[in-house]
Amino acid sequence: MGVELVKDTIEFEKLLGENVVNLIQKEEYIVPDSHPDVKNIISVDVKPVITTEEIVQDKVYVEGVIQYSILYIADESEERTEAFNLVYKSKFNGYVDMPGCEHDMKAVVNCFVEHMECRILNERKICLEGVLTVNALVKAIHAFDYVKGLSDTKNTQMLYYPLTVDKKIGAGDCNLIAKTQILVPIEKPQIANVVKNNVNFHKKSIKVMDGKVIIEGSANIKFLYKGKDTREFVAVEEEAMVSGEIPIDGATSDMLALSDVSIESIEYNVSDDDLGESRVIDVEVLFKGTVEIIGKDDIDIIDDAYCPDVRLNLMKKPYDLNIIFDHKYLENIVKDNIEIPGNMPKPINCLMTTGDISVVEKKIIDDKVLIEGLVKASVIYETNNENIYLASLDEELPFSCSIDIPGSRVGMDVIANLNLESIEGSIEANTIAIKSVVGADVTVKYNAHKEFIDDVSVIEGEVPKKKASVTIYTIQNGDTLWKVAKKYFTTVERLSEINDLEVNDSIKPGEKLIIEGRAII
């Protein structure tokens, strides 16, 4: 007699690993003829963008582009100095070691500037040297078949237990475009040239609807420009709302959305207003929004099975299911003060404050996820020095935050993404006070070790024989109706009927059960 198996497939995503690599960058550039000689470097703004990510055997290959914006002081005349801006681009590439990764897996890659400095080699040549840190997280899709039922076996008894598993419903991406026009007020000088820009995506909102996901947010856009026919620098900023839609078949409002928004490019153009004055900045920022929709699938797993008519051999295999335990987003206010070094001129006005953010450590302690990170603040300010009238400070500000996730414990996996929602600087008692809002997006996952029936076969040989007499069985510790029924080749329903019990009734040690017509083989 054969056994007809009914099978199904469980598919789940599992974190394979996370690793970083430091890439050394060193570039030398010539100052173009259109610019005067370099006297003093004020600031270096570095924007790395990843353009390619590819998984090869045991490694993640990454390519990207870096844009350098250098603000420097030059001697324009014997009477005074002037500030100018230089923009350069270079490429970078590297490998992140990831043992076990293969080309069909999924990689999430981020890049940030660990350190970057600009040195003057001579008045017409500069050197940029520093370190980029590339972080790669690789996920693998696991799938296996299991026996969910047996058919064509009339009397087969099956014991089930419920199990909830994650089910990836779908994933997708979309372009989010922020368009705005910044108008310089009449009391400010006209625009000679833009020397620095910065964009933060914040106020992110994810709405999962039937068959689609809506991503909304706001782009905070900052520009610093040099005034026309003046040494004055002016900072302007604007907010622009953005939204995008990603179709996801099968998505419903009760599902979890894991999302990310990254800046792809910033394009701007300076033009004249209605009076013919250079006071208009048309800006277009391209963001890429990605989303992954996770649902919960409630399934019944066969824990045990037997047949009163034949002997069955159940073959089980163990699997570790990676299941999302919880997902939360929390905003934290980070405050700190940057001391002005003794060799630096004193600030009289903060022009523009920008920043970057990175995770240093993440761990679970006492139902909480603890995150330690760095806010890398960069401040350009006006000084009280006539010759060096602009200066900048770069400082790494450590912070820590905790997110309550009841039930989380050591050994679970933590995936944490940080976003710098906003940052601002102000002068406070001969220091620069930094206030930033950090958004922490945290997912906690755990491994559920379960055994699944992989195959069932019939053991050849003598089938259990009936006998006319009844058996009076005394219940032992650990007995259940299922165990007794299986032991005596009967069914839970028949035991319940004979002993005037409900199928789900519990039995206690010392109680008696009447068992008819079956003997132990």
Image (cartoon, helix red, strand yellow):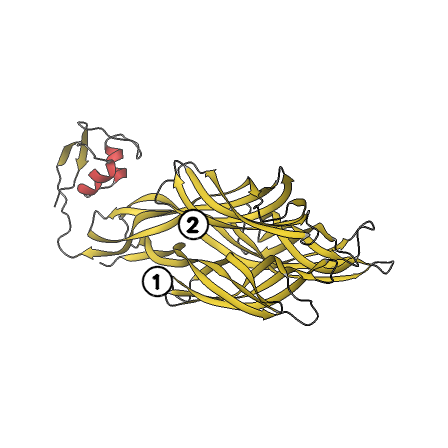
Whole-percent x, y for residue 185 in the image: 80, 50
Pick the front one: 153 or 442: 442
Apparent side of residue 154 relative to residue 182 in the rendered image (left or right): left
> Which amino acid type is marked by label 2?
Asp
For mark 2, give the secondary structure.
strand
Whole-percent x, y for residue 388 in the image: 67, 53
In percent of the image, x 15 and y 33: which residue is there? 473
Pick out the residue farthest to the right.
Answer: 275
Task: Answer above or below: position of 34 versus 245.
Answer: below
For mark 1, give the secondary structure.
loop
In percent of the image, x 62 and y 40: which residue is there? 430
Residue corresponding to mark 2:
166
Apparent side of residue 321 relative to residue 77 in the rendered image (left or right): left
Residue corresponding to mark 1:
100
Whole-percent x, y for residue 334 in the image: 55, 40
Pick out the residue farthest to the front.
Answer: 78
Which callout, 2 or 1, points to the residue nearer the camera?
1
Apparent side of residue 46 relative to residue 507 in the rendered image (left or right): right
Cα–Cα span, label 2 and label 1: 23 Å
Q: Quadrant of residue 337?
A: top right
> Which amino acid type is marked by label 1?
Gly
Neighbour tally class for label 2: few under 14, some 14-19, many 20 plus, Cα within 10 Å: some
State which tag comes first along the sequence, 2 or 1.
1
Give the position of the N terminus as an image quadrant: bottom left
Pick the front one: 438 or 235: 235
Viewer can see residue 256? no
- Total marks shown come to 2
> What label does residue 180 carry, if any?
none
In percent of the image, x 28 and y 46: which residue is there? 303
Viewer can see residue 103? yes
Whole-percent x, y for residue 495 in the image: 24, 36
Pick the front one: 204 or 482: 204
